Amino acid sequence: MGPIQSSSQGDGAVLFGKTSSPLKVTKGILFRCCFCTYVTRYQQGIVSHLVTPGDEQFKSQFPSVSSCSRSTVSSNTQKHESDKLFKCKLCPLAFAHNFRLTSHNQTHTGEKPYRCKLCPKAFARKSHLRDHDQTHTGEKPFKCKLCLKAFARASDLRKHYQTHTGEKPFECKLCPETFTQTSGLKRHMPTHTCAKPFKCKLCPQAFARTSDLRKHNRTHSGDKPFKCQFCPKAFAHSGDLRKHNKMHTGEKPFKCKLCLKAFAWNSNLKRHNQIHL
């Protein structure tokens, strides 16, 4: 770890080289760890949190650190070496912190404790509810430069751009599948585990996720909750409705890079690309 130079950042915040990032507060909380949620108001605190045992350069700059408990420093060092001790029992993912595992487990159980006050939607994470709340204002300041679509959130615009590029940067480490969004990869991961605790009551099928069981149940009930706003058609799955809507809007976001053709569905673009081989 290189030498640390401090610089004032205003609002009482201080930036320390590459080891911490500024936290703009006014009540004396000055130092935030880049690698975890540790925050301290003391210079000595962040240094002792980050320094590795035997790092004499740090100790010469900050002599008071040399009296730190070696076990405390060692435990913090291990934490920043990405030790992922908390392993999911239903998929191959593992986490450095128990609270992240607890949050991840909700993707398997389907638990969604954070409910919108304006519509029936519910979410596994509070941050997702906050993002969703913005959709009720009607404001869509983030506009696509390649088509007429606009979005309430910058993250949705970034995801949308991938429909134009065909980019799928999120790769499964266990199979060749790739995904445009990290959420798609997360939904995919349970398919690699043998655990299928969610069993259909009407047939022998079982599923790794409650969301898959809910979708499957519609094949028995005939329920089609996703209704087209342009025609009387309705669908059991939201993805089928999105595909259908393109018939009405004429949207063709999947463009061939070698000719002028464009397509409503990525699968059609893939078939078309074969004529250029």
Image (tube, helix red, strand yellow):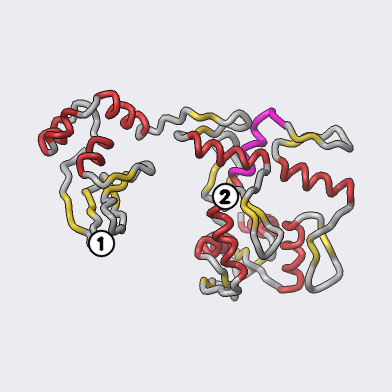
Mark 1 is surrounded, within 10 Å at the Cα level, by few (under 14), some (14 to 19) or many (20 or more) other residues, namely some
* Range shown magenta: 186-196
Tell me the kind of residue under disc 1.
Answer: Asp
Q: Which residue lies furthest to the front in this view?
A: 27
Residue on which disc 2 sits? 125
Tell me the kind of residue under disc 2.
Answer: Arg
Q: Does the magenta stretch include residue 137?
A: no
Identify the secondary structure beneath mark 1: loop
Q: Does the magenta stretch include residue 192?
A: yes
When asked about the image quadrant of residue 103, the answer is top right
The answer, for residue 233, to whether it is visible in the render is: yes
Q: Quick check: 270 left or right of 226?
A: left
Residue 57 position in % (x across, y down): 13, 34
Residue on which disc 1 sits? 11
Q: Which of marks 2 and 1 is nearer the N terminus?
A: 1
Nearest to the observer: residue 68 or residue 224: 68
Q: Quick check: 16 left or right of 272?
A: left
